[in-house]
Amino acid sequence: MSASIGGGFAARRAVVRWAWRLLRRDWRQQILVLVLLTVAVAAAVTGAAAVYNVAPSANGEFGGANVRIEFDGRDPRALAAGVTAARRQFGTIDVIAHRSAPIPGSADNVDLRAQDPHGPYSGPMLRLRAGRYPVARDEVAVTDGVAAMFQAGVGATFALDGHRRTVVGMVENPGFLGDEFVLVPPAHADPPMVASILVRGSAEQAAAVAQGDGGSYELRRDSAKAGGTVGVFAVDTVFLLLVALVAAAGFVVMAQRRMRQLGVLTAVGATDRHLRLVMVANGIVVGAVAAVAGVVVGLMGWFALAPHLEAAAAHRIDRLDVPWWLISGSMLLAVVTATAAAWWPARAISRIPATSALSGRPPRPVPAHRSALLAALLIAIGLGCLARARQTNALLIVAGTLATALGVLFISPAAVRALAPAARPFPVAVRLALRDLARYQARSGAALSAITLGLGIAVATIITTTAAKDTAAEGNLSDRQLVIRVGSTGPDAPVVGEWSSAELGRLRAQVDRFAATLHRPGVVALDVAVDPAVRESGEGKILRPFAFLGRRVGPHTYRDAGILYVATPELLRQIGVDPASVDPDADILTGQTGDLSIVNMGNGQAPPPAIRHLQRIHVAAYTSAPASFITAAGLRQDGWRQARSGWLIETDRPFTSAQLAAARDMAAGAGMTVEARHDEASLSAIRSGATVVGMLLALGALAMTVGLIRGESAGDLRTLTAAGATGTIRRTLTAATAGTLALLGVLLGTSGAYLALIAGYANDLGTLGRIPVPHLAITLIGVPLAAIAGGWLLAGREPPALARQPIE
């Protein structure tokens, strides 16, 4: 009986067919929703693939083995016994010999590696990029970093470790692209310093071999990709939450647009279930199309992104090595979330009486205080979970992040409702725009939630990457700086030799001749503070230990120790400090913070002097550039004297590979060493990418929402035009709508991101002390301005005549 009243299967089929026809007829109105859903799914797919593949690869250390046993090669008998024992225990083994060789004129060493290119396990650790593998004693293959260092491509000859060798090939370690080495043929290798034996077996077998012959072993770690599944799932979940919010904003507008049609359907006998089915069927189709299109676009984006990601991940990436199960789940969840997003407004519409639906009036908004209370509860739960997690519990981090995000999103309706009372002081066009947002609270709130979430993710990424130490932005030196040290002076050899004036003059002449080849160079002498009462012997000279300045973290533990240079006026001016600004009573000048002490004087033979008057100065945060200084007053008070340790060369252009090679050749011939910038991965690209993506997501949601709201209020716009409203008023309406949503979105998103991060870093708030002012300013100011400009430029067209009313 109930089936006949409801119409049964035939009625549902008729309703679905009608919904399909509406979808086909209104496809232009739904294209924005479909595009944004596709973009969100594509972003989820690309992000999941990127997070899955950015994890370090164990192939760089273990190749195809699961155990690595190491022996000290300086004891040939023990090494031979270890290799024999490993072969007897495991059968098949793969031996890689390492020998460290100093680079002439440089403070760095390079690994001379004897490795079989066709070894049973080391294959994934070696790949030929050009030329061929070495086979003769005087042949080598080099990585790109070594080739740049020696300016030696295929066919070139260079000297290393007392031998001249010809480069016959270019190689790399696909599992670790930062692994720089010189490959030599195993049959002609010199005795190794360390030998690594790759095997497949159990920990017990490895322990028996290593312990019996004085070696050590390491087991292959579980794949970091599996360990990162929780993180990938969290990223995917957040993106799909954004999908649901974007979809909800669109489906709310569609439900409002179809209100009269649904009212007619109710008047002819359709039940609430039939009304919901109209929208749900729409949601299923849109979700399915967006899921398929999003996966295709996402995979295309991944294939384009993967080559650029390899440099950041430091290993080669297989383009098809993606979490297919997660992508399939993302497609399913996209359909489910789109369906749910369509069901919620359908549920609200189905409860509207037929007479109200036929009138086309929007439903009465839900009281904002309800969502505000729910938001406060969710935020409290989320912040509690994040604080409890202490950056280690993945489950609590995911739960806390989602709860905090949902809590911030539930504030959106209250924020939108507050717009109408706040509109009174503004001009009439702005008042109309703000009251329209409050009038259409459901769609405005959903759109504001999508904008808030997109910007919140971007802001959180910017803040966390800024909190992490950006080694490329700081690093050891600027790419325009060189430090040339006399002898072995440096952080790893904290002594300086006593040089005569004639010897120092000869070395300075060599430095000046090299500097003359550069563009507008600045050469400044570097002197260190030494205690004349403390001396050592070595290198045929008297050696004097020099002072460091470090941050005390324990009774006898220091971190971030830097060389304490003598504050000469020339050096201070070179680093951007005015000598006149130095306090005459100061004995130490530094850019470091924390509890600082003078350390490493004379290997503990005498207690280091106390700091009497420390003056903070602003210097670049390069770890090898001068950053801490002792003044002339400090030298006199401690009875120290200054000793020449080298020279700082700075130009107005980055050093080229050829110039660095020339510097090393000069230093090697003069008995000096050169330290240049070490290339390291940068987080600045991630910050910039997060800023751009967050802005695009926010502006995309804005474009959809503003277009739909202004389209929905086309009748009001016609009335205004008929009453004499100019194009300026129409532009102001749209610009005010877009700018208000953007401003609310950036404020809520930034506040939510900082709340979550403050809770997550509650035990180490100093980490968040570095505020990314440029990127936050671009987001906080750029997004509203871009929204206002876009709304103003795209909204000047005059609407159709009053007589041309749309046919329902």
Image (cartoon, rainbow, N blue to C red):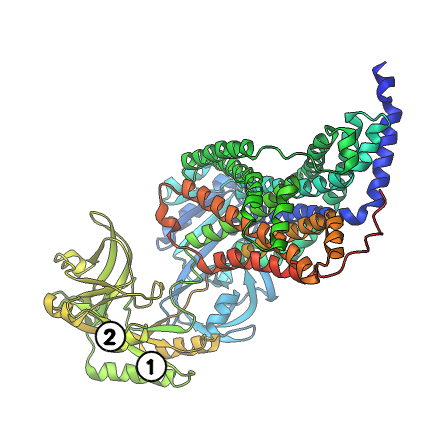
Res 100 quadrant in image: bottom left
Q: Nearer the viewer, residue 436 or 90?
A: 436
Estimate the x, y position of residue 670 in percent, counting from the top left.
32, 79
Q: Secondary structure at mark 2?
A: helix
Whole-angstrom CA distance, mark 1 to mark 2, is 25 Å
Does residue 123 appear in this view? no
Estimate the x, y position of residue 432 in percent, counting from the top left.
64, 50
Left or right: where 7 falls relative to 285: right
Q: Residue at x 43, y 75 (%)?
A: 660
User: Height in image: 46 above or below 600?
Assistant: above
Disc 2 residue type (three-letter): Pro
Q: Secondary structure at mark 1?
A: helix
- Circle 2 residue: 579
Is the residue under label 2 in contact with that under label 1 (CB below 8 Å)? no
Does residue 536 appear in this view? yes
Disc 1 residue type (three-letter): Val
Estimate the x, y position of residue 122 in percent, counting from the top left.
54, 51
Estimate the x, y position of residue 127 in percent, counting from the top left.
58, 59
Q: Residue at x 50, y 61 (%)?
A: 187
Image label count: 2
Which label belongs to residue 511?
1
Q: Nearer the viewer, residue 124 or 615?
A: 615
User: Height in image: 264 above or below 547?
Assistant: above
Left or right: where 208 falls relative to 127: left
Q: Residue at x 20, y 82 (%)?
A: 501
Left or right: where 65 falls relative to 491: right
Q: Residue furthest front?
A: 723
User: Height in image: 741 above or below 353?
Assistant: below
User: Height in image: 139 above or below 742?
Assistant: below
Which of marks 2 and 1 precedes in the sequence? Answer: 1
